[in-house]
Amino acid sequence: MATQGNPKIRIAHATPLGDAARLLRLERVDGAELGFAGGQYVIINTGVTLPGGRLAKRAYSLLSSDAEQRTVEIAVKRIGAGPGSNVLNDIAIGAELEWSGPWGKLRLAPGFSGRALVIATDTGITAALGIARSAAAAGAAQLDLLWLVEPGETFASEPFVRERLPAAVRLAVARDLPPIGHPERPARACALVEQELAAGPYDAVLCAGDGAILYPLRDRLASLGAPEGSVLLESFFNNPMKKSS
């Protein structure tokens, strides 16, 4: 259930993550459970006022297991002069911020028992971790995770991801994705995903990351016979639906 009013979260713990990111452990100030499912996200009010008077509110996927509801983890990549990411990379332990959530439909249905493929590009690995570590994922007959990243990406290391995955999850990492915005990026991603499909179809495909990849990928999966509604997307950036609205 999403939050009501203006509740607060507290920064309970923080550790560096890669070269320019931070792993934050959060807890509700009132001690209540968050009530999230793996794959969902929260929106955090950083308290920074943007030009035009709006507050800088940013969405962050919960990468921790939904078996633990009182303390959760997010990973925040510092993005240039971005007000939200810089505040959360510098904020002190014990600080309190307003938040809302959990939000999002990028999750496996309760009782799911089929074969699932989770595809993450770039920082979308946070949502992918949440899905793979969820209670719903535990009942899957098979769960594979494909992470598509650029060469030299340092947001989160492969060991960091592997040590957080359940033993039953198969992880494949493709580190030859063209840079964000490159015209060949979507085609390369589709080719890498098609390699994963060689072993047979999946009952559910959940995708998180670069919207410039995810929407063409959904169309490609549909052309290959993916059942309607079996492919779910969560754009972290380059969301064409927002640009057209």
Image: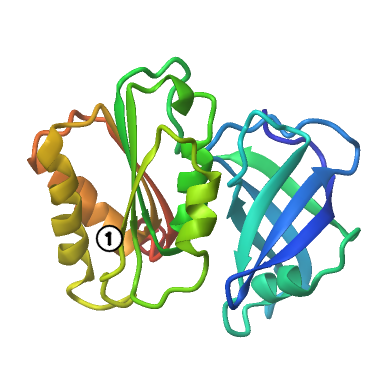
Is residue 52 visible to us here?
A: yes
Q: Position of residue 200 (x, y in %)?
A: 13, 32
* Render colour scheme: rainbow
Residue 192 lies in quadrant: bottom left
Residue 23 lies in quadrant: bottom right
Q: Horizontally, is 225 left or right of 91 in the view?
A: left
Which residue is drawn at the image coordinates 81% and 69% (left, top)? 91
Quarter of the rendering occupied by the N terminus: top right
Q: Amino acid at mark 1?
A: Ile
Q: Position of residue 197 (x, y in %)?
A: 15, 41
Question: How would you rate the neighbour count of disc 1 (Cα within 10 Å): few for under 14, some for 14-19, many for 20 or more?
Answer: many
Residue denoted by label 1: 213
Tell me if residue 80 comes above or below residue 196 in the rendering. below
Tell me if residue 166 comes above or below residue 41 in the rendering. above
Which residue is drawn at the image coordinates 29% and 54% (left, top)? 214
Q: Position of residue 219 (x, y in %)?
A: 17, 47
Quarter of the rendering occupied by the C terminus: bottom left
Q: Horizontally, is 64 left or right of 44 in the view?
A: left
Question: Looking at the image, which is closer to me, 169 or 234?
Answer: 169
Q: Position of residue 84 (x, y in %)?
A: 68, 70
The single residue placed furthest to the bottom in the displayed view is 81
Tell me if residue 67 comes above or below residue 153 in the rendering. above
Q: How many marks?
A: 1
Q: Horizontally, is 147 left or right of 124 in the view?
A: left
User: Of helix, strand and loop, which one carries label 1?
Assistant: helix
Which residue is drawn at the image coordinates 58% and 31% (left, top)? 37
Which residue is drawn at the image coordinates 87% and 62% (left, top)? 93
Tell me if residue 32 comes above or below residue 212 in the rendering. above
Is residue 222 visible to us here?
A: no
